[in-house]
């Protein structure tokens, strides 16, 4: 097609890919948290869905009810991972103008 410069689009796509990869690197350093049990268990995750740490309030530890603590941990981890995915999608969406690009987001 006359006037259509495919090389321009390829360069733009490459620039966007570079920006996305740079932002993903930055997201690995950011932290989000997920809580359960009104904050009895707090899980901290990176912006790239890696669990960084878990804080357990001593009130959550009852030796005769370990299953409750296990449930709180699962809920807090899932909340942290959800927060991390949402944060990543929002941040990368800023770079792509909200366009979902398969394999990048």
Image (spheres, rainbow, N blue to C red):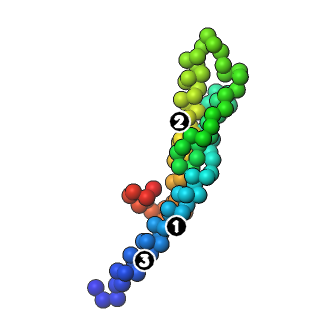
- Say which label, 3 or 2, has the lower sequence index: 3
Q: Quadrant of the C terminus?
A: bottom left
Q: Secondary structure at mark 3?
A: helix
Q: Quadrant of the N terminus?
A: bottom left
Q: Is residue 83 visible?
A: no
Q: CA distance from mark 1 to mark 2?
A: 28 Å
Find residue 64 and report its image quarter.
top right
- Say which label, 1 or 2, has the lower sequence index: 1
Q: Is residue 32 left or right of residue 96?
A: right
Q: Position of residue 12 (x, y in %)?
A: 44, 75
Dot 3: within a 10 Å radius of its alpha carbon, few (fewer than 14), some, or many (20 or more) residues? few
The residue that appears at 41% across and 61% down in the rendered structure is 101
Q: Position of residue 44 (x, y in %)?
A: 62, 40
Label of residue 78 in the image: 2
Q: Secondary structure at mark 2?
A: helix
Q: Is residue 90 left or right of residue 8?
A: right
Farthest residue to the left: give it: 1
């Amino acid at each position: 097609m006359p006037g259509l410069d495919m090389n321009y689009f390829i360069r733009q796509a490459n620039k966007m890919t570079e920006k996305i990869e740079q932002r993903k690197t930055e997201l690995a350093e950011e932290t989000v948290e997920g809580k359960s049990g009104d904050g009895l268990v707090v899980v901290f995750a990176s912006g790239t869905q890696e669990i960084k740490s878990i804080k357990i309030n001593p009130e959550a530890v009852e030796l005769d009810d370990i299953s409750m603590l296990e449930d709180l941990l699962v809920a807090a981890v899932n909340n942290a991972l959800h927060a991390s995915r949402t944060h990543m999608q929002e941040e990368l969406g800023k770079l792509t103008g909200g366009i979902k690009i398969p394999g990048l987001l």
